[in-house]
Image (spheres, grey):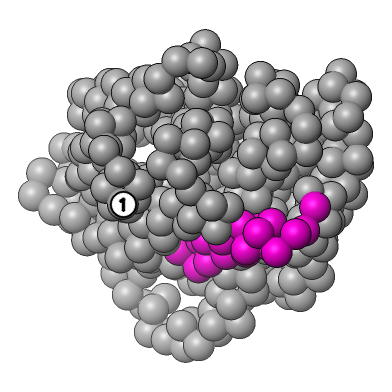
């Protein structure tokens, strides 16, 4: 039995949950980064005299960087390792956040947002895989749900900093983000181990010692060179037997891309535009930030809620329900914001559901791919998903300049999110988690002969 199979079938230790916690901490950076732009949007727009389209482009530049980072940096995680790529990506984020805080113009700020996006993209693709690889089959959905909750925690932190600096300097929010990213770089450099699945697959120098050190912390038996050789031979045999797996994965890969595109379209619309749109609708900047904070708080709860639901039902089925409910509640939210307390309450629900959708996409994706291409598969899925994330604020800005109301924009975004459920229905036949017999494999998506 290979290491992935052992992890999948063995109860999780406290050390494995610590690794999930570290990944969650890094996912906070994504939430803080995106919401730092959203919450400072009115102030940035005023200082740099930006139109709706220009502000939408400023938001999209960071998302473009995330797409490039996910698609171009993530594949290196399968070559040099998950941990080294994360450290490189955190360095880029630190430079980008501090640089944006000191930017003298929108153009300079945009270029530094691109750098930050590159780093965030590399982090997300790698941490999602690490959280999955250190989780067993029973708790994988919950672990990814906790991991995804990091976005809501980071977004909430951004909202608190933004609210504390209302009427002051918006740059403080980005300085705070830079400090948090620098702290993450230090902590991860000291604590985070390399993925044992990667070490088993690649066998770099000292791999056996590193694997056994990590397995000991996970309260699992040590392995020998013979065990690794046997696992490598089994994988080679499985690869020959299933040499057509790339062709077999083409359709589910496209469906996974569409899943990420539709979900991220709605997710980044809600998180990027809500405060600015509510100010335009007549709410005070403080009230708009409060409504945005409600969405962030809900996001933290929703990710864990999805993970709990995914323990008792197929993750893909749970995601269908979350996407349909998200679409419905987005419309209810924008119609209720005139009553602040009601809008706040519904905002929590919207944040919970749409963030749960992201957790669902992260959970459904990794099992589709064998371990040796998992970072590539998820990196490209995240990168393609950023198409939706990029289009969302840009299209919203263009439609807003053309006279579209906040209600119309929210209704359009809700329709895109609802379309995700149709894509997920088509993914059923390719989803290992939907086939009970596949759950005995070392990792869903790996040929049974590889076990």
Which residue is drawn at the image coordinates 36% and 26% (left, top)? 171
| Left or right: where 387 falls relative to 198 | right
Question: 10 Å neighbourhood of mark 1: few (<14), some, or many (≥20)?
Answer: few
Q: Is residue 263 visible?
A: no
Q: Is residue 215 visible?
A: yes
> Taking 142 as reference, is 406 left or right?
right
Q: Quadrant of residue 249?
A: bottom right
Image vertical order of residue 148 relative to residue 169, above or below: below
Q: Which residues are magenta?
A: 383-405
- How far across and how far down the image is residue 184, in percent? 30, 26
- Which residue is depicted at the point 78% across and 48% down? 406
Query: Residue 47, how many percent across, how many down?
Result: 43, 35
Give the secondary structure at mark 1.
helix
Q: Residue furthest front?
A: 49
Q: Quadrant of residue 219?
A: top left
Q: State left or right for residue 99 relative to residue 63.
A: left
Q: Horizontal and vertical percent for residue 451?
A: 47, 62
Q: Is residue 330 above or below residue 53?
A: above
- Dominant secondary structure of the residues highlighted in magenta in the image: helix
Q: Is residue 61 left or right of residue 280?
A: left
Q: Which residue is located at x 80 percent, y 52 percent?
A: 405
Q: Pick out the residue farthest to the top.
A: 164
* Residue 394 within the magenta-colored segment of the rendering: yes
Q: Toward the viewer: 28 or 265? A: 265
Q: Position of residue 247 (x, y in %)?
A: 50, 88
Residue on which disc 1 sits: 107
Marker count (numbered): 1
Residue 296 falls within the magenta-colored stretch: no
Quarter location, residue 88 = top left
Q: Which residue lies at the image location 50% right of the left edge and 31% below the top edge?
A: 43
Please name whichever residue, 289 or 184, is drawn nearer the observer in this view of the structure: 289
Asked whether 448 or 320 is in front, the reply is 320
């Amino acid at each position: 039995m290979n290491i992935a199979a052992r992890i999948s079938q063995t109860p999780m230790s406290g050390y494995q949950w610590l690794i999930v916690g570290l990944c969650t901490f890094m996912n906070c950076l994504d939430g803080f980064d995106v919401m730092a732009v959203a919450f400072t949007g009115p102030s940035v727009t005023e200082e740099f005299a930006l139109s709706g389209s220009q502000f939408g482009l400023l938001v999209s530049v960071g998302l473009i960087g995330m797409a490039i980072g996910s698609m171009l940096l993530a594949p290196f995680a399968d070559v040099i390792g998950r941990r080294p790529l994360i450290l490189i990506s955190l360095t880029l984020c630190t430079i980008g956040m501090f640089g944006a805080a000191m930017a003298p113009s929108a153009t300079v700020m945009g270029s530094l947002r691109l750098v930050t996006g590159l780093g965030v993209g590399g982090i997300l693709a790698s941490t999602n895989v690490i959280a999955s690889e250190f989780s067993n089959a029973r708790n994988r959905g919950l672990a990814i749900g906790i991991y995804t909750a990091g976005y809501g925690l980071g977004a909430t932190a951004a909202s608190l900093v933004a609210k504390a600096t209302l009427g002051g300097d918006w740059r403080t929010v980005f300085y705070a983000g830079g400090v948090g990213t620098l702290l993450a770089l230090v902590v991860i450099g000291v604590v985070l181990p390399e993925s044992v699945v990667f070490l088993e697959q690649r066998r770099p120098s000292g791999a056996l010692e590193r694997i056994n050190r990590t397995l000991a912390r996970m309260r699992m038996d040590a392995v020998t060179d013979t065990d690794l050789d046997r696992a490598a031979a089994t994988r080679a045999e499985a690869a020959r037997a299933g040499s057509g797996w790339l062709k077999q994965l083409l359709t589910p890969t496209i469906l996974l891309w569409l899943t990420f595109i539709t979900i991220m379209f709605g997710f980044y619309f809600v998180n990027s535009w809500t405060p600015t749109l509510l100010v335009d609708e007549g709410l005070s900047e403080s009230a708009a930030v409060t409504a945005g904070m409600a969405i962030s708080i809900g996001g933290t709860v929703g990710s864990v809620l999805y993970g709990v639901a995914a323990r008792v039902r197929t993750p893909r089925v749970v995601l269908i329900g979350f996407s349909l409910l998200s679409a419905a509640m987005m419309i209810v939210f924008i119609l209720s914001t005139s009553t602040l307390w009601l809008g706040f309450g519904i905002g929590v629900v919207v944040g919970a559901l749409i963030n749960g959708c992201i957790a669902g996409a992260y959970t459904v994706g990794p099992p589709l791919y064998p371990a040796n291409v998992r970072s590539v598969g998820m990196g490209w899925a995240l990168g393609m998903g950023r198409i939706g994330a990029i289009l969302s604020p840009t299209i919203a800005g263009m439609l807003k300049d053309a006279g579209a109301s906040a209600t119309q924009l929210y209704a359009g975004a809700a329709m895109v999110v609802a379309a995700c459920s149709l894509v997920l229905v088509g993914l059923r036949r390719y989803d290992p988690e939907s086939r009970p017999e596949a759950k005995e494999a070392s990792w869903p998506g790996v040929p049974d002969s590889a076990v």
